[in-house]
Image (tube, rainbow, N blue to C red):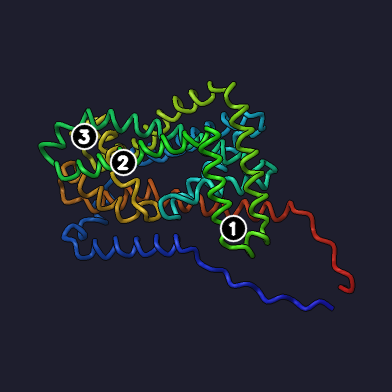
């Protein structure tokens, strides 16, 4: 007779703890903010039509995310349906939002793709290229936004310019770094360093066959690089499609802005301000740049929300651009794990079990 194994305690991810702490901090900040008394009244009097448009824009953004992943995968003869690519895209965004400095997105996407028999080196190369395409669009649109808004920011809010310049330098540097990984000498140095690093822990290295795994990863990544040289059109399309995707992501704020009854600023101005806000906090090490996003919003958008409703605007904007995505991602992960568990073949009982 088999003895049931004790159930393992499920640990709460640190990222989720941090997000919960951030929500509490924002609420406490509001309690001691003179605008807090107007929050619920303001929210109940928003124009729902604009909020619905904001949600629709977010869904279209997800279609672009999945579509670009599918494009890059299919360019390497990896079949992928639109539904599967959207799932991988949302999972990546979800884990990016709940891990420090958005470090968890690509590794978890690679893990899910490995479950579908896509080699880790190959999937990582595709996902890095996807990130590269988005970063190109991000930096390009942010540079244009800075040119468009520089005069106004210099005269009205010069204190935020150093953060914008720093964000531009860091994100521009990331394009150079991740792009350089597709050159063999750079990839070789990274892989050799990884083997040296895991070699400092012999027991773990032997247990997980780290050296062999890194060699296989390098070979898969190299095969992608060799094959990809003949398919540069997909990269160009990836960058071109990432531009409207980025604009869609940044435009949600405009529809939040309009839902509050404001119309003194146009679509391009609000999108430009949002892109510069994103640029100035994107390098913050907190999950989803939580805390920095809210503070940055207050600094960037104060001139636009002038009826004692800035705190309410922060809450609504953050809910639609962050917490709603986290909730949707968490539900997707749970449902996907449940469905995957049902598909897995049942293990045969061990000898002696009845």
- Residue 22 is left or right of residue 4, and the answer is left
In the image, which is nearer the foreground, mark 1 or mark 3? 1
Say which label, 1 or 3, has the lower sequence index: 1
**Element at label 2:** helix
Residue 57 seen in the figure: no
What residue sits 58% from the left and 51% below the top?
A: 195
From the viewer's side, name the closer residue of 255 and 138: 138
**Element at label 3:** loop
| Label disc, if present, on residue 279 of the rendered structure | 2
Residue 82 position by quadrant: top right
From the viewer's side, name the closer residue of 152 and 173: 173
In the image, which is nearer the foreground, mark 3 or mark 2? 2
Instruction: Kindly give the residue lying farthest to the left in the view shown.
Output: 155
| Label disc, if present, on residue 86 of the rendered structure | none
State yes or no: discs 1 and 2 in contact (Cβ < 8 Å).
Answer: no
List the residue tagged with mark 3. 263
From the viewer's side, name the closer residue of 306 and 223: 223
List the residue tagged with mark 1. 199
What residue sits 25% from the left and 53% below the top?
A: 295
Residue 155 seen in the figure: yes
Say which label, 1 or 2, has the lower sequence index: 1
From the viewer's side, name the closer residue of 134 and 129: 129
- Mark-to-mark CA distance, 3 and 2: 24 Å
Say which label, 3 or 2, has the lower sequence index: 3
The answer to whether residue 352 is above or below residue 65 is below
What residue sits 46% from the left and 34% below the top?
A: 132
**Where's residue 328, x and y in %?**
49, 50
**Where's residue 27, x and y in %?**
29, 62
- Mark-to-mark CA distance, 1 and 2: 37 Å
């Amino acid at each position: 007779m088999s003895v049931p194994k004790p159930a393992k305690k499920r640990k709460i991810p640190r990222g989720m703890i941090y997000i919960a702490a951030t929500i509490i901090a924002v609420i406490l900040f509001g309690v001691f903010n003179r605008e807090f008394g107007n929050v619920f009244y303001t929210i109940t009097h928003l124009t729902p039509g604009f909020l619905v448009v904001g949600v629709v824009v977010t869904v279209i953004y997800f279609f672009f995310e999945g579509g670009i992943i599918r494009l890059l995968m299919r360019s390497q003869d990896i079949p992928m349906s639109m539904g599967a690519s959207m799932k991988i895209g949302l999972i990546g965004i979800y884990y990016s939002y709940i891990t420090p400095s958005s470090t968890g997105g690509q590794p978890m996407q690679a893990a899910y793709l490995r479950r579908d028999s896509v080699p880790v080196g190959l999937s990582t190369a595709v996902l890095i290229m996807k990130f590269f395409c988005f970063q190109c669009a991000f930096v390009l649109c942010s540079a244009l936004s800075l040119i468009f808004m520089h005069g106004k920011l210099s005269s009205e809010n010069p204190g935020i310019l150093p953060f914008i310049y720093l964000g531009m330098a860091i994100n521009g540097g990331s394009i150079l770094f991740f792009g350089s990984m597709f050159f063999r000498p750079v990839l070789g140095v990274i892989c050799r360093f990884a083997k040296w690093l895991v070699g400092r822990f012999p027991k773990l290295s032997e247990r997980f066959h780290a050296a062999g795994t890194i060699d296989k990863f390098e070979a898969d990544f190299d095969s992608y690089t060799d094959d990809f040289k003949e398919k540069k059109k997909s990269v160009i399309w990836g960058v071109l499609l990432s531009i409207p995707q980025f604009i869609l992501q940044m435009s949600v704020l405009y529809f939040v802005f309009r839902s509050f009854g404001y119309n003194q600023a146009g679509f391009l101005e609000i999108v430009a301000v949002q892109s510069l806000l994103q640029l100035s906090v994107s390098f913050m090490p907190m999950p989803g740049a939580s805390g920095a996003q809210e503070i940055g919003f207050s600094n960037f958008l104060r001139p636009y929300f002038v009826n004692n409703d800035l705190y309410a605007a922060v809450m609504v904007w953050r809910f639609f651009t962050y917490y709603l995505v986290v909730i949707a991602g968490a539900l997707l992960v749970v449902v996907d794990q449940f469905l995957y568990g049902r598909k897995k073949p049942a293990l045969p009982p061990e000898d002696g079990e009845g």
